[in-house]
């Protein structure tokens, strides 16, 4: 009985410290809770929207929207000068003159690039042989201007790890935009519902940013602040475009090789795993960037935080990947309909890509927190080169799923570059890192054992029983991981004492 009493007191004390304490760990916990709740709510609504829209709109609409969205992504990467990251990382980031300079730079660059897209939209449409793309792109690209006009004071909330209003603006605006898209789809049963919904989402976010973070930019610019911003932006130079090659080359190439319907099936399928992966990356990025920024001069703490976060991600992620390997077809059939089952291979590969990308992102966050985004450039360049080299032959060999096979190879190469770089920069312990992978791989076998052990029963042939079976395997894997980690902790405690 004393054992349980002591443990309960320890757990209760930890919870109280996390809720009311002022330590860095407590701030990260509270920030993660706010961001997690907001982002999770938004992603649930988006998932519900996708389930509904796949039954209202034809796959061709999603294929066309993928082209438009990818072109919009080009704009976002070209307009990204690292305003948020610079404000968070720079000690002067909270000063009004610094914020004003950041706002003018972001708005000016985004407005200029929107004008370029408006002018060249017909040429983009002609390249894909679809003249409908030109007006769609001109409307959708306006989101870039709206995003550039966001109140820069919103980023101060992230810097100070006060995430309540940030979640309300970021995720609340997203939820409202999703609901508008759903409403439009009942009246406009084509790709225009998706485009107008995307623009409305950016508009709502822009308005909410000023309601929650009032800001009036000054016409008097601090040139020292501008130089700081441009210096940080210089470190980002080329990164956005190289990241774009990895993230969107598959869509651009597949759009030339296959029909809009085939592209639509592919995009909807991979979004099933990219949506939760985006949720995790957003949550971790916005909570860990200010965390690493606060400890950027303490190398030991940097490595300890990075190892703990990465270990948890691997232990959670690898059983999920095993689950996706066995249950992807059932998930697609259940959520989107039988015709989306054709994209099963793409979804399985996308799951592996998502896991590596999330792990890779944590190392990148360390570089950004140190104000050295250029350290990330070599890995991104390697990723882009591999993607460009493999995308065409992979797509020819494997069909649309080849896009994710090329992505998996490229992110694997980039991840290895990142690991090598962090080892030299912070002295990160790769042996401990490898142990997390070996443990995760071992417990993931539980998913396979449960799956193959029960498949002999005909009851488990349907989509829902198959998914439940995979979920049971994941729970067993997590239970086994908990037992192993508890025993390791018990063994280590006496040695420390």
Image: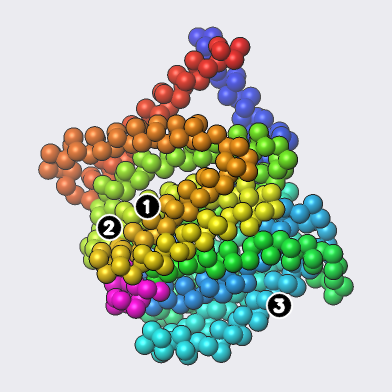
- Residue 219 lies left or right of residue 456; in this view the side is right
Q: Residue 374 versus residue 328: which sits nearer the camera?
A: 374
Position of residue 7 relative to residue 54, above or below, is above
Secondary structure of the residue carrying numbered label 2: helix
Instruction: From the image, tell me which residue sits under label 1.
Output: 351
Task: Using the image, determine if residue 444 lies above or below residue 277.
Answer: above
User: Where residue 493 appears, x then y in whole percent?
Assistant: 55, 15
Q: Residues within 10 Å of mark 2 (few under 14, many from 20)?
A: many
Q: Which residue is mark 2?
A: 345
- Image position of 211 with respect to 188: above or below: above
Q: Circle 3 sits in a helix, a strand or a loop, which is it?
A: helix
Disc sitting over residue 108 in the figure: 3
Residue 365 in picture, x, y percent from top left? 60, 50
Q: Residues within 10 Å of mark 1 (few under 14, many from 20)?
A: many
The residue at the point 54 percent across, 9 percent down is 2
Per the image, label 1 sits on a secondary structure element best described as helix
Q: CA distance from mark 3 to mark 2?
A: 42 Å
Asked whether 235 or 343 is in front, the reply is: 235
């Amino acid at each position: 009985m004393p054992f349980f009493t002591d443990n309960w007191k320890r757990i209760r004390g930890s919870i109280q410290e996390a809720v009311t304490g002022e330590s860095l760990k407590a701030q990260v916990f509270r920030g993660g809770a706010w961001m997690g709740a907001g982002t999770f709510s938004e992603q649930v609504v988006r998932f519900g929207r996708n389930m509904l829209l796949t039954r209202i709109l034809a796959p061709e609409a999603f294929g066309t929207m993928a082209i438009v969205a990818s072109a919009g992504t080009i704009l976002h990467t070209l307009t990204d000068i690292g305003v948020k990251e610079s404000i968070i990382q720079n000690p002067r980031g909270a000063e009004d003159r610094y914020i004003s300079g950041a706002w003018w730079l972001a708005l000016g660059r985004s407005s200029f690039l929107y004008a370029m897209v408006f002018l060249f939209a017909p040429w983009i449409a002609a390249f894909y042989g679809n003249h409908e793309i030109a007006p769609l792109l001109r409307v959708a690209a306006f989101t870039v201007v709206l995003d550039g006009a966001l109140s820069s004071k919103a980023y101060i909330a992230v810097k100070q790890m006060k995430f309540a209003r940030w979640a309300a603006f970021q995720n609340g605006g997203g939820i409202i935009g999703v609901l508008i898209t759903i409403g439009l789809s009942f009246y406009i049963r084509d790709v225009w519902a998706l485009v107008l919904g995307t623009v409305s989402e950016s508009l709502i976010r822009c308005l909410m940013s000023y309601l929650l973070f009032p800001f009036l930019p000054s016409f008097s610019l601090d040139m020292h602040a501008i130089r700081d911003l441009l210096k940080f932006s210089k470190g980002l130079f080329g990164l956005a475009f190289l990241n774009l090659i990895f993230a969107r080359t598959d869509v651009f190439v597949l759009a030339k090789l296959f029909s809009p319907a085939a592209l639509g099936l592919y995009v909807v399928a991979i979004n099933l795993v990219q949506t939760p992966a985006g949720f995790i990356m957003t949550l971790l990025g916005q909570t860990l960037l200010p965390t690493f920024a606060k400890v950027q001069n303490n190398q030991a703490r940097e490595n300890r935080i990075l190892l703990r976060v990465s270990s948890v991600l691997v232990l959670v992620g690898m059983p999920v990947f095993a689950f996706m390997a066995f249950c992807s077809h059932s998930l697609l059939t259940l959520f989107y309909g039988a015709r989306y089952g054709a994209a099963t291979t793409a979804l399985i590969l996308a799951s592996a890509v998502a896991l590596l990308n999330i792990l890779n992102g944590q190392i990148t966050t360390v570089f950004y927190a140190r104000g050295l985004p250029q350290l990330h450039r070599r890995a991104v360049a390697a990723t882009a080169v591999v993607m460009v080299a493999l995308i065409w032959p992979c797509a020819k060999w494997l069909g649309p799923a080849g896009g994710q096979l090329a992505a998996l190879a490229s992110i694997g190469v980039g991840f290895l570059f990142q690991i090598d770089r962090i080892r030299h920069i912070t002295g990160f312990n790769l042996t401990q890192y490898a142990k997390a992978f070996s443990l995760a791989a071992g417990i993931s076998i539980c998913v396979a054992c449960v799956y193959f052990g029960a498949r002999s029963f005909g009851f488990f042939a349907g989509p829902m029983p198959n998914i439940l079976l995979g979920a049971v395997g994941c729970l067993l894997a997590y239970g086994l991981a908990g037992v192993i980690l508890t025993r390791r902790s018990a063994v280590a405690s006496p040695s420390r004492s």
